[in-house]
Image (cartoon, rainbow, N blue to C red):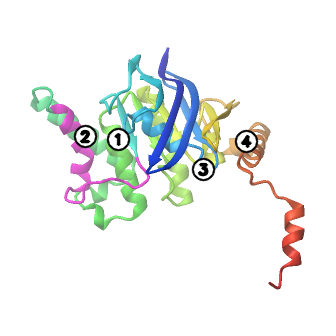
Amino acid sequence: MSAIRCREVSKLFRDGRARVLALENVSLEIGEGEFVTLVGASGCGKSTLLRLIAGLDELTTGEIEAGGAPVLSPGADRAMVFQNYSLYPWLTVMRNVKFARQLSAHTRDRTSVDVEAASGRAEALLGLMGLAQVARAYPSQLSGGMQQRVAIARALMTRPHILLMDEPFGALDAQTREVMHDLILHVCRLEGCTVVFVTHDVDEAIYLGDRVVLMAPRPGRIDSIHTVPLPLRRTLAMKHSAEFLDLRARILERIRETSGLRTDLELLEKLSKYASA
């Protein structure tokens, strides 16, 4: 069964007379519990597609379904982690994480059991993110990487059916990023969450994904889809395997071909003639 279904999705941005076709005829199905990563050069529409699935932007043409229902606006079944944290500066770390659960609680009567469960889940998530010691701190007192971990914990707080992540680990150092890779894989597998994950990092895309969707720019479209030939349980040693390195090389080569980033020796020679200009 498909958790997400995109059919002939296009998105046209208008700014006065200027028009930018960000996406053209994108069709994609993502299964229940699948972890799909989106990669591609800048301007290929990765983040635009993610925002459309989240219901944050309006389609120009086509349709998107989540859980069999049309996506017309944001919904409780979907949670999104943005690049820029989007934390509430007047709330502590703990209250930021619990905020989404409190919003959903407005639609039903809250009991002491609900409150206790929410507090316990928030504490567990902060512990997993290595943030238990700063639960009473405010976002301004944290580093960028710590703020992003708070944002991830908040997104997981409501146990969303679909988790949408837009470059969520970009602000983390290399060591913390590797820990977060394994953590997000474990949590999402444990809770059966479907994940769509945008990244510029091909290694990250392969390590996390069940499938890697390669997008091409001008206009944004799906170029190719690659099934990752690795076991569900990932280890860092797999990054050195022949299967990983072969897929990495093929995806990087295709990104160069679709984005025009291939090195042109003739142009380099021409440039060298004007080195003194």
Instruction: Check if residue 93 falls in the magenta segment.
Output: yes
Closer to the N terminus: mark 2 or mark 3? 2
Residue 18 place in picture, x, y as percent? 50, 50
Tell me the amino acid under the disc marked 4: Ile
- Image quadrant holding the C terminus, namely bottom right
Q: Please, what secondary structure does the residue beneath circle 2 have? A: helix
- Magenta segment: 82-105
Q: Are marks 4 and 2 in contact (CB under 8 Å)?
A: no
| Residue 64 lies in quadrant | top left
Q: Could you say which is closer to the camera, residue 14 or residue 199?
A: 14
Look at the image and tell me whether residue 151 can be seen.
Answer: yes
Q: Are marks 1 and 3 in contact (CB under 8 Å)?
A: no
- Distance from label 2 to label 3 (Cα)? 28 Å
Per the rendering, the mark at residue 155 is 1
Look at the image and tell me whether residue 185 can be seen.
Answer: no
In the image, what residue occupies the spot 43% across and 59% down?
Answer: 145
Closer to the N terminus: mark 1 or mark 2? 2
Tell me the amino acid under the disc marked 2: Ala
In the image, what residue occupies the spot 18% across and 38% down?
Answer: 102
Residue 205 place in picture, x, y as percent? 61, 42
Q: Are marks 2 and 3 in contact (CB under 8 Å)?
A: no
Instruction: Say whether residue 265 is left or right of residue 95.
Output: right
Q: Which residue is mark 2?
A: 100
Tell me the amino acid under the disc marked 3: His
Q: Are marks 1 and 2 in contact (CB under 8 Å)?
A: yes
Per the rendering, the mark at residue 9 is none
- Distance from label 4 to label 3 (Cα)? 12 Å
In the image, what residue occupies the spot 25% across and 55% down?
Answer: 88
Which mark's residue is nearer the viewer, 4 or 2?
4
Q: Which residue is mark 3?
A: 200
